[in-house]
């Protein structure tokens, strides 16, 4: 039973790490989009 519990704990940790990596990727992409949008707006404003 303890072996099964340890196995389950390892699976929980791995799934948590994977979901955290996915969250970081989405968050970085979101920040990149915001920065790109802001710089594009500034560039359009300077172009006028």
Image (cartoon, grey):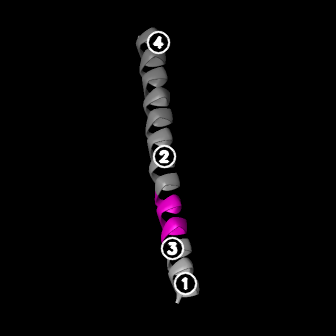
Say which residue label 3 marks: 40
Q: Which residue is mark 2?
A: 25
Cβ–Cβ under 8 Å for marks 1 and 2: no
Lower sequence index among marks 4 and 1: 4
Q: Quadrant of residue 19?
A: top left
**Image location of residue 15, percent across then percent down:** 43, 31
Mark 1 vs mark 2, CA separation in Å:
33 Å
Q: Does residue 9 lie above or below 48 as drawn?
A: above
| Mark before the other along the chain sequence, 2 or 3 | 2
- Quadrant housing residue 11: top left
Instruction: Identify which residue is drawn at 50% across, 79% down.
Output: 41
Residue 32 among magenta residues: yes
Mark 1 — residue? 47
* SS of the residue under disc 1: helix
SS class, disc 4: helix
Q: Where residue 8 sits: x, y (%)? A: 41, 21
Give the residue number, with chain letter if any, for mark 4: 2
Mark 2, other Cα within 10 Å: few <14 / some 14–19 / many ≥20: few
What residue is shown at x 48% (from left), y 21% (from top)? 10
Q: Is residue 7 left or right of residue 38?
A: left
Of residue 9 and residue 22, the one placed in the foreground of this image is 22
**Magenta part of the chain:** 30-37
Choose mark 4 or mark 1, whichever is in front. Answer: 1
In 3D space, how far apart are the residues under numbered discs 2 and 4 (Cα atoms)? 35 Å
């Amino acid at each position: 039973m303890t072996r099964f519990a340890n196995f389950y704990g390892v699976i929980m940790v791995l799934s948590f790490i994977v979901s955290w990596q996915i969250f970081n990727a989405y968050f970085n992409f979101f920040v990149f989009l915001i920065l790109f949008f802001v710089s594009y707006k500034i560039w359009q404003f300077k172009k006028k």
